[in-house]
Amino acid sequence: MEPLPKYRHLALLSLLLFSVSLYSETDITEKENRLDKEILSLYREIAKARELLSYEQVSSLPANTTVQFIGTYPNRTGIRIRKFKVDPDPQNKNRIKHSEEKSILLEFNGSVLSKVEILITTEDTEIEQKTKTKITDTTPLDDSVNDMMIYFSGIDGTDSFALSSLRNDSVKQERNDFKKDFYIKFLLDFHSQLTSITALQKSNGNQNQKKMFKQLNQSLGY
């Protein structure tokens, strides 16, 4: 068989590389779509935390956790859950060596989740360095996750950018990595936290009801 001319080899190689690249880009897009669906599903799950707005006060919480409501009872519009970790200085127990706080803010327009905001703050007193990262999604229930904004401030200054600006191709999958390795894990963490907080309120409420009925029944004895 007569060998193919050199230019035909180059043409076939180019077509092969193009096909591989096209397949890779399609695969990356499909992966991102799956990640986006998982994020939207988690948004719908954590939106159930709206039930906590109906409690006049939250009396039981997991360790190292605080709750702050947005608005006044009974007309609240949101809730912020904070988790924090503090490492004391081994040389001085009255001094903090390192601290970290992470929180999620959920705001509602009526019964609809209208905003999700994540905030992570770390502080190292030894080197006097404080960093803060905020991630905001003001349209959490639409079809696009990539419109969320990321804000960062630290010793080197401040920066902000849309998630859509991160590279997501066959060379670097920055956007997919961010969603898979951080954002989904963060939402899962707080979904578990919110579920625990809600369960604690219901348990505490049941105990209060039992005490009330016991008091009422005892009042019939005289």
Image: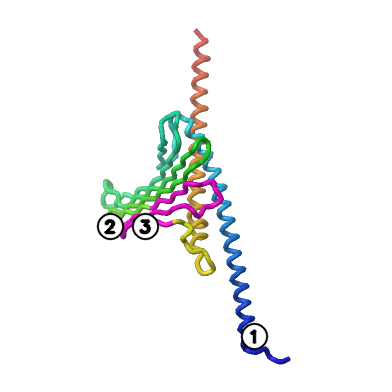
- Amino acid type, residue under disc 2 in the picture: Ile
Q: Quadrant of residue 152?
A: bottom left
Q: Report if residue 144 lies within the magenta region.
A: yes
**Tag 3's secondary structure?**
strand
Camera-side residue of 53 and 188: 53
- Amino acid type, residue under disc 1 in the picture: Arg
Residue denoted by label 1: 8
Q: Is residue 205 visible?
A: yes
**Tag 1's secondary structure?**
helix
Residue denoted by label 2: 127
Q: What number is the disc on residue 159?
A: 3
Q: Is residue 199 visible?
A: no
Residue segment shown in magenta: 133-161
Q: Residues within 10 Å of mark 2 (few under 14, many from 20)?
A: few
Query: Which comes sooner in the sequence, label 3 or label 2?
Result: 2
Q: Quadrant of residue 131?
A: bottom left
- Residue depicted at x 50% and y 55%: 146
Badges 3 and 1: C-beta atoms under 8 Å apart? no
- Residue depicted at x 51% and y 63%: 168
Q: Quadrant of the N terminus?
A: bottom right
Query: Which comes sooner in the sequence, label 3 or label 1?
Result: 1
Numbered circles on residues, count: 3
